[in-house]
Image (cartoon, rainbow, N blue to C red):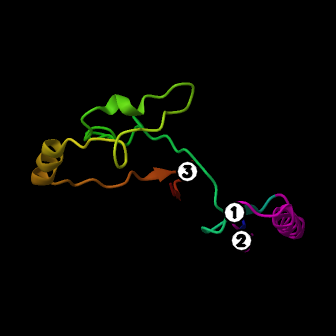
Amino acid sequence: MTAFKMLATEEMHYVDSYAKIDTVLERVASVRQAVGREAGLAVDFHGRVHVFIQEQSLGIHYNQGNDLLDNLVDPAIFKFREGFIDLPNGPGLGIEVNEEKVREAARAGHDWKPPIWRNEDGTVAEW
């Protein structure tokens, strides 16, 4: 299998023109036409496109032994409702860190390593 990775965009602002988006579509379409449908094509935006994304990884399977909210005094502050969380309204970031729990974790240290995921053919799948 042949695969290509391309940087498809010029730098873009948070709010930009449709013309720049159309240019991206044209670039990707021309590469797809040139290499065919069987070739793998990865489009890399490499920090050039600014989007507002909410990645939810609370309770995800690789957070074993320590999850994202474990070091907060009140983890319920990030309760999901219909796929969204309310913005915290406290001072600063709106959260209160359980400092003693953080100190305990620092004393214990860690040996966390990212999981290694593999594709069906045994090759490493990046995450």
Q: Which tag, 1 or 2, sits closer to the chain's start?
A: 2
Distance (Cα) linking label 1 and label 2: 6 Å
Distance (Cα) linking label 2 and label 3: 22 Å
Question: Which element carries disc 1, helix, strand or loop?
Answer: strand
Give the side of residue 38 with respect to residue 99, left or right: right
Is residue 58 within the magenta segment? no
* Residue 75 against residue 119 in the figure, above or below: above
Q: Which tag, 2 or 3, sits closer to the chain's start?
A: 2
Question: Which element carries disc 3, helix, strand or loop?
Answer: loop
Q: Picture coordinates of residue 50 (x, y %)?
A: 64, 60
Is residue 17 within the magenta segment? yes
Q: Please name the amino acid that badge 2 sits on.
A: Met
Question: At x 13% / y 49%, what residue is drawn?
Answer: 103
Which image quadrant is residue 95 in?
top left
Q: Please name the amino acid that badge 3 sits on.
A: Asn
| Image quarter of the N terminus | bottom right
Q: Which residue is mark 3?
A: 119
Give the side of residue 19 with respect to residue 119, left or right: right
Q: Picture coordinates of residue 2 (x, y %)?
A: 72, 67
Q: Which residues are magenta?
A: 8-37
Confirm or deny contact between disc 1 and disc 2 (CB under 8 A).
yes
Q: Picture coordinates of residue 39 (x, y %)?
A: 77, 62
Which image quadrant is residue 64 in?
top left
In the drawing, what numbered circle is on residue 42?
Answer: 1
Q: Which residue is mark 2?
A: 6
Confirm or deny contact between disc 3 and disc 1 (CB under 8 A).
no
Mark 2: few, some, or many residues within 10 Å (few <14, many ≥20)?
A: some
Give the side of residue 119 with respect to residue 91, left or right: right
Q: Picture coordinates of residue 8 (x, y %)?
A: 74, 69
